[in-house]
Amino acid sequence: MTETKTGKKKVAIVGAGTAGLEAAKVAAERGFDVVVYEKSDRIGGQVNLASVPPRKSELMRRITTYGEELPKLGVRIELNHPAQIDELNQADAVIIATGSKNTIIPVPGHDGPNVVSAWDLLDGKKTVKGSVVVIGGGLVGVETAEYLLEKGCSVAVVEMMDQIAPSLDPKLRPYILKQFEESDVKQYVHTRLSSIDAKGVHAVDTQTNAEIYLPCDYVVMAVGSTPTPLDVTGIKVPVSYAGDCAPDRTHSIAEAMVSGAKAAKALDL
């Protein structure tokens, strides 16, 4: 790397989610001149969504801390600023931490007006009401179902596996399942989505091949995420990756922090 006029080598980080923010912190602590480019109007990435369901608001504490610490370390955070190739080429190295996006199952009807992504719902970009079928019974699906219950919706969850949210904290899972039972949340496990129409969801029981139809007002997709790597064409400086867009994807906030720190520690002094 070459030195800037300030005597520091410059690192550009694309994405202000947990991985990008931790990379910025570690790189700045190592003596680099760091700039973070974030295309949205706030830092935090997926944590802004993860903190919305019940009991999850504490997750934002770490993001608040980054917002306080990074300026003190001299890190510049450019919000509403999609990174441009010429800007990145002015740095000595680039760390891409662009995260991932909500996955939509491309069944017939997936693009209908009654279909909403869990991310858009939790981000406040979309609203739903009435009866809702949540596609996906993993952690995001279960937390989205909880959020919908708080909003007064009636909820059903469709999951291909044999149970919902097996990765939930063992101490928390019984509480949530009891809440679902008391709130009459229908759980359709061993069930595969086949199509969506204006009035509901068509699915198949994978054990019996029986067809299932679930009438509803809205469908919420909560089936995981897909990496959103940046197109690196034209970038002439060394590039590395952190977080969900990295080849070794992260599955938690803690893993994203480790990934960001690792990318920053690997920078060549």
Image (tube, rainbow, N blue to C red):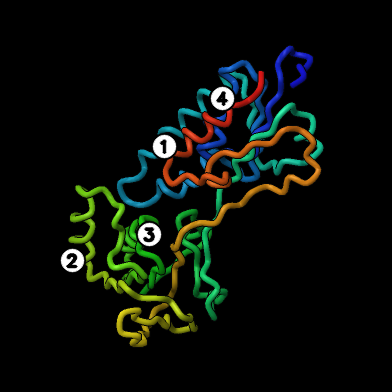
| 7 up-or-down from 174: above or below | above
The reply to whether residue 150 is in sight is no
Mark 2 or mark 1: which is in front?
1
Name the image quarter holding residue 154.
Answer: bottom left
Q: Which residue is mark 4?
A: 265
Q: Earlier in the sequence, mark 2 or mark 3?
A: 3
Q: Residues within 10 Å of mark 3 (few under 14, many from 20)?
A: many
Mark-to-mark CA distance, 4 and 2: 49 Å
Mark-to-mark CA distance, 1 and 4: 16 Å
| Residues marked 3 and 1 touching at CB (< 8 Å) | no
Q: Earlier in the sequence, mark 2 or mark 1?
A: 2
Judged from the image, the secondary structure of the residue bearing numbered disc 4 is helix
Question: Where residue 236 appears, x then y in whole percent?
Answer: 79, 36
* Residue type, label 4: Lys
Residue at image x 64%, y 33%?
36
| Residues marked 2 and 3 touching at CB (< 8 Å) | no
Q: Earlier in the sequence, mark 1 or mark 4?
A: 1
Question: Where residue 225 appears, x then y in whole percent?
Answer: 50, 56
| Residues marked 2 and 1 touching at CB (< 8 Å) | no
| Residues marked 1 and 4 touching at CB (< 8 Å) | no
Q: Which residue is mark 1?
A: 254
Q: Which residue is mark 2?
A: 182
Q: Earlier in the sequence, mark 4 or mark 2?
A: 2
Residue at image x 44%, y 62%?
222
Mark-to-mark CA distance, 3 and 1: 21 Å
